[in-house]
Amino acid sequence: MPIGPVAVLEPACPGMRARIEQLCDGFDLRFVSSVETEDMRTALDGAAYAVTRGLRFPAALLAEAGALKMVHQWGTGVDGIPLDTAKARGVTVARSPGMNAPTVAEATLALMLATLRRLPQVQSIFRGGAWNQPDLWREARDLGACKVGLVGMGAIGKEVLKRLSGFGCEIAYTKRSGADAALDAQFMSFDDLLGWADVISLHLPMTSDSRHLIDAGAIAAMKPGAVLINTSRGGLVDEAALIAALQSRQIGAAGLDVFETEPVDGPNPLLEMPNTVTLPHVAGRTLDNFDRMVRHWSGNIRAHAEGRAIDPACIVLP
């Protein structure tokens, strides 16, 4: 008997659908064709399982999905799932902690390098016909010459730390639970790290406590000309304060994969600034990570359907 139905609440191109079907042998999969409410409602009608990725799962739709047993996040952050509604309905919520950490860590370093070396801007000038880049001597930086501060030290933060060690830069970190003797980096308080680092990279979940962690006050405490990297959640940063700081050059540059409102709909100054490198929330999107993630969430759904235990680290709501 097929496992499911499983509603995959992520619009997918034919090739992506075929890949998921290949990796989910024996599953009754339903794919949404758009982000419209009715398409999602149709996919959820009678579904025992739902998989959500970058889209917010409307609480009203979860409340209506009477057959739903489990919602699985395609990734780690569950801020897009209405947990109160799931709990009230008795719906299990699971996620894939750490599965995308190597891929996002690589993208984080790519943003650091691209931002410090101004690679998109250099390429744009070069493609515009200019060989000489007269300002690079004072604008570009070596990552190895920088002090890098990591805010948060979960799975992704640890993978970033591991990769940074080969560059020879000074590294410090801060995390709410305090210092970890197993980490080969200096621990600092958040306030001290702000004024110390040339590059600050965010690796935190989105919670009520972390929202706008980087606000006007935090930015004012940063080293003038520092670089901010965010591959976590857009809401960690007050975008209005960041824009003002980039315009005034209080912050030298920013490398962003995430935004306060996603998808970005309409004008956003961050996409047009000469001192930003911006990506459309794709830090985790590689073929290798795609396969790893699908195998993980499908394995958890299969285990649940067959009455087997799921790793407790994956369970957000039992």
Image (cartoon, helix red, strand yellow):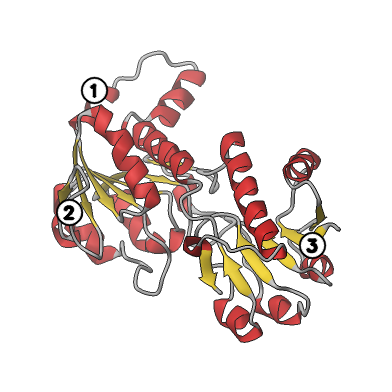
Residue kind at label 3, given as amino acid type: Gly
Q: Is residue 158 left or right of residue 307?
A: left
Q: Based on the displayed image, in which of its 4 quarters is residue 255 positioned?
A: top left
Q: Can you tell which of label 2 and label 3 is closer to the viewer? A: 3
Q: What is the spatial separation of the Cα atoms under label 3 and label 1, in whole angstroms?
A: 58 Å
Circles 2 and 3, Cβ within 8 Å, touching? The answer is no
Q: Nearer the viewer, residue 239 or 316?
A: 316
Residue at (81%, 50%) from the top-left corner?
A: 26
In the rendered image, residue 175, in percent from the top left (x then y), is placed at: 25, 60
Question: Residue 232, percent across and down?
Answer: 43, 54
- The reply, left or right, for residue 298 in relation to residue 313 is right
> In terms of secondary structure, where does tag 3 sit?
strand
Q: Is residue 121 above or below residue 33?
A: above
Q: Which residue is mark 3?
A: 4
Answer with the quarter of the image where residue 108 lies.
top left
Three-letter amino acid code at the position of disc 1: Trp
- Of the residues tagged 1 and 2, which is closer to the observer? 2
Secondary-structure class at tag 2: helix
Q: Quadrant of the C terminus?
A: bottom right
- For marks 3 and 1 on the same chain, the one whose residue lies earlier in the sequence: 3
Whole-angstrom CA distance, mark 2 to mark 3, is 48 Å
Q: Position of residue 246 (x, y in %)?
A: 32, 49
Q: Mark 2 or 3 closer to N-term?
A: 3
**CB within 8 Å, label 3 to label 1:** no
Residue 292 % position (x, y):
58, 42
The residue mark sitting in front, 3 or 1, is 3
- Of 153 and 126, which appears nearest the observer? 153
